[in-house]
Image (cartoon, helix red, strand yellow):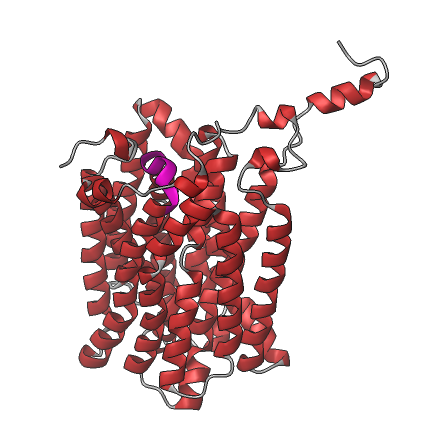
Amino acid sequence: MPHPHVPPSATVAAAKPTFARLWVVVFALSLAMIQYLDRSFMSQAAPMISAELKLSKQQMGLIFSAFTIAYALFEIPAGYLGDRIGPRKMLLRIVTWWSFCIAAIGRMWSLSSLMVMQFLFGAGEAGCFPNITKAFNRWLQPSERSRAQGVLWMTARWGGAAAPLVFFTFIKYMTWRSAFALLGCVGVVWAVLFYRWFRDNPREHPSVNAAEAALLPAEPTVAQGHFRAPWSKLWRSRTVWCLGGQYAALSYCWYFFVTWFPTYLREARGLDLKESKLLLSLPLLLGGVACFTAGWITPWLARRLGHVGTARKTLGVVGMFGAGLLLLVSTRIEAPYVAVAVIALGSFCNDITIPGAWTSCMDVGGRSVATLGGTMNMMGNFGGALSPFAFGWIVDYTHQWNIAFYVTAAVYGLGGIFWLLLDPVTPLEEQVAD
């Protein structure tokens, strides 16, 4: 019965959910766009940097790899700390650190200084997506998570897709060095706003009323500070190794788009900077569409196939093998614009696997979701770290981009096999050692 001094309209309003949990998705989407914009800027600036500092392709490959090696090495520590102290503190540290580093890249003067700063930049970005996934796990119901991951990765890819347009706009008014400094400022603003708004426990947020709290996942049964990662189960689980293996394959292949793709268009397809400006964004734009599509069709596919695990594996296998096949087809096409369109479709197939991989981390990881996400992303980015150096080495010594593509197609095939072998739904606590 309503309180006699409370107007009926106020009682009705109090009974309505505030939808505060959707703001977590908004913050996550904006961070994903900032991160991929920052990460992709180096590939856009690579021709200017290599010309100014007189760097070879192999040296630029080392600079690209320095970021990815650090990103991989620090994924597990950053994910573990997110499980232990919460994503609020961790994301503040992560974004502030990498924003300083991206700004400092514009002040570097040599191969060694760029490699050091790229390494620190990669260490700073590590843990971003595992901690976002941890936040989703706290704030979103299981039925909402697949679509949230789909929209998240769509935004991430579109952040990378926007990088060429943003970069070319910036350099009309400033040097590439100043452009990096401006990017750093954007990240700091996000970190301050996020820290002021977000709470690790959504029920402690002032915008979460009783109706909204009823839509939230159950509270953890163990205090956050008492978290202990199940390291033994992690290292003995075939699913964990296969999740990491498929992500290593995916990352090896995908890093081509944010490292060597601009150079490929110029050298292999004869397209100049002006002609390639829009083409550079196409693979990432279609990749974003794929992430969104996968996030929204997975529940439907699960109903059709009778099991959510089967739906995720189907998208994983089809995506990996389809991407490899399309990459092989592109090597047989002479027309540059048609070839780029086929490569972009390969990027679509590549990214249709991503929401399923991260949602699998949420189901399999349980309370260790950020640790498992960090483990998968670490293994994935070791593959990504190898990619730019391997592409540079193959092209330098064979003078054939197609050979690099043949190797990449084989890696995609290996990723498809990993998807066939993993169990994307059974929690670690219930798994039997393989």
**Residue visible at 40% across and 88% down in the picture:** 110
Looking at the image, residue 291 sits to the left or right of residue 401; the answer is right
- Outermost residue on the top side: it is 1
Residue lying at 53% horizontally and 42% vertically, measured from the top left:
200
Above or below, 51 relative to 270: below
Q: Observer-nearest residue: 253 or 90?
A: 90
Quarter of the figure with residue 362: top left
Q: 160 or 136, which lies in front? A: 136
Q: Is residue 160 visible?
A: yes
Taking the spot 35% from the left edge, 34% from the top edge, the residue there is: 363
Image side of residue 153 versus residue 391, left or right: right
Q: Quadrant of the C terminus?
A: top left
Magenta-highlighted residues: 363-370
Q: Residue furthest front?
A: 226
Position in image of residue 211 (x %, y %)? 63, 23
Q: Is residue 8 left or right of residue 132?
A: right
In the picture, which quadrant includes the N terminus? top right
Res. 290 in view: no
Residue 280, image x, y percentages: 44, 66
Q: Main secondary structure of the magenta part?
A: helix
Residues 267 and 157: in front is 157
Residue 247 position in % (x across, y down): 29, 51
Q: Position of residue 19 (x, y in %)?
A: 63, 33
